[in-house]
Image (tube, rainbow, N blue to C red):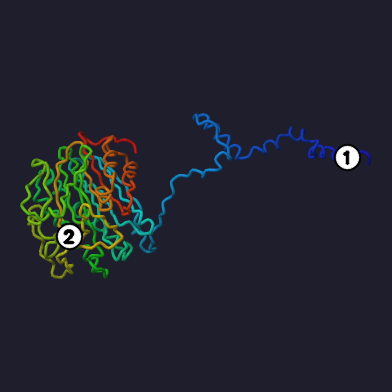
Amino acid sequence: MDRQGDRRRHEDAWWRELYEDDGDAAARDTGPAEAARDSLDDRVDSAFRAVGQAAGAGSVPSADAGRGAPPESGPRPESMALPAADPGALDELVPDTELDGAGYGTFTLRAASLRGEAARHRGEPRGDALLTARFGAGQHALVLVAVATAAPGGGAYAYGGTHRAARDACHWIGGAVGRSYTRLAEDVRTGNRDALKSGLHRLADRTYGKLRAYAVEHGMEPEQYTAALRCLLLPADPACRTRVFFGAGAGGFFRLGSGVWQDLEPPPQEDATGGPAPAGGASGPEEAPVDTPADTPPWPVPGAPGPDTLVPGAPDVPDAPDPGALLPDLGGTVPGLPRAPSGRPWQPPYEPVPRTAPEPFRFRAVAARPGDLLLVCSAGFAGPLTEAAGFGSRLAARWTAAGPPGLAAFLADVRLHAEGYGQDRTAVAVWEGTEAAGAVRPG
């Protein structure tokens, strides 16, 4: 019993020595107390001090030093809301942003389409659509770029799903061009401007006829399911520098050369001057002017829409309608949005836009020069480019500094802020090089 008592008293003395005040020295020898003070915050502060000294940043200011000033913060996150989704039609969801690029022959292509600030805030789908497609291979390939902007229905794109009209317009014109790309590519290379103009006019007629038929079938007015459409044909043959623009409705077609923007589409008042347009092409004059109503049939051509496939040797008149087919009433109006005159504010696409006059079919063949930049864009991008102070000059400086940008850099350029312009933006830029398209600067 005495031995057990002595052992118990010895153990009690050891525990008192470890945890009481006079046992601090022994406790420090064991190490855990010192490690406990080495918290995660201490280690993070130590790492910041080491990194700051290595980069020459000096000592890290104390917490009290900057207590009087508000802490610095990064850019505020964008106010973005997703559009409402239909569980039975998830394949119809439109992404917020689309980005694409390619290089063929002597040109480098960059394309971007993004939802505007207003649509992001309201949770509305993007009303712009973008299509980039290559038909064929090798030097016989033909690249099509289509940009479309849906006409608002009742003040919002979400009305009746009218934002889908832009996608349908791109897909339908793309399918029609793809089925006829062999003849189109040959006409572009040989400078057969008359055949290109009449053929593309018929393909566009067919596309707008489908849009109107869809609107009638789903109980909508034709003006509620339509879109402004602008397209560019780019042959991959490096020996051919002819670029063909066509479409109808609002938007822009520009050339950037020597740091200066040139509008390749004349103001609306010049469309009524009349007079025949000279033929142009790969071997003709530098470029052919935009066609006028004097040599362009009224839009759309009365009667049935033309075929969506170009057949060599076929007449330039629409085929006879099928008596059993239900044809849409094309009437005498032109689908699309009016192009805002210079100096007048561009109306946001989510507000109803008054249609003051029919839009003619627009066609232009341009002989691109080395160093040029061709730009096809929607009205949401043409507005700030032509009217916002400093917007065009900033883009000109960015896009002429060191050649074509990478995809990420191009998207950042398209997103440049312009006060008062919150529409969807779609822009397609084509850089013309002196040699075959190759490496570009990283983006």
Q: Is residue 284 above or below residue 147?
A: above
Density class for disc 2 (Cα within 10 Å; few <14, some 14-19, many ≥20) is: many
Percent position of residue 17, x then y? 81, 37
Of all residues, the one furthest to the front in this rendering is 68
Quadrant housing residue 81: bottom left
Q: Secondary structure at mark 2?
A: helix
Percent position of residue 37, x then y? 67, 38
Of all residues, the one furthest to the left in this rendering is 276
In this rendering, the count of numbered labels is 2
Given residues 180 and 371, the one toward you in this image is 371
Q: Earlier in the sequence, mark 1 or mark 2?
A: 1
Given residues 202 and 80, the one toward you in this image is 80
Whether pointer 1 and pointer 2 mark residues with C-beta atoms closer than 8 Å, the reply is: no
Q: Is residue 94 above or below residue 393?
A: below
| Residue behind mark 1 | 9
Given residues 396 and 124, the one toward you in this image is 396
Is 393 situated left or right of 122 in this image? left
Q: Secondary structure at mark 1?
A: helix
Residue occupying image coordinates x 78% and y 40% = 19
Quadrant occupied by the N terminus: top right
Is 267 situated left or right of 133 in this image? left
Type of amino acid at the residue the image marks with label 1: Arg
Is 307 situated left or right of 115 in this image? left
Density class for disc 1 (Cα within 10 Å; few <14, some 14-19, many ≥20) is: few
Distance from the alpha carbon under mark 1 to that under mark 2:
104 Å
Q: Is residue 35 above or below residue 388?
A: above
Type of amino acid at the residue the image marks with label 2: Arg
Q: Is residue 197 above or below residue 369?
A: below
Quadrant occupied by the C terminus: top left
| Residue behind mark 2 | 206
Percent position of residue 75, x then y? 43, 46
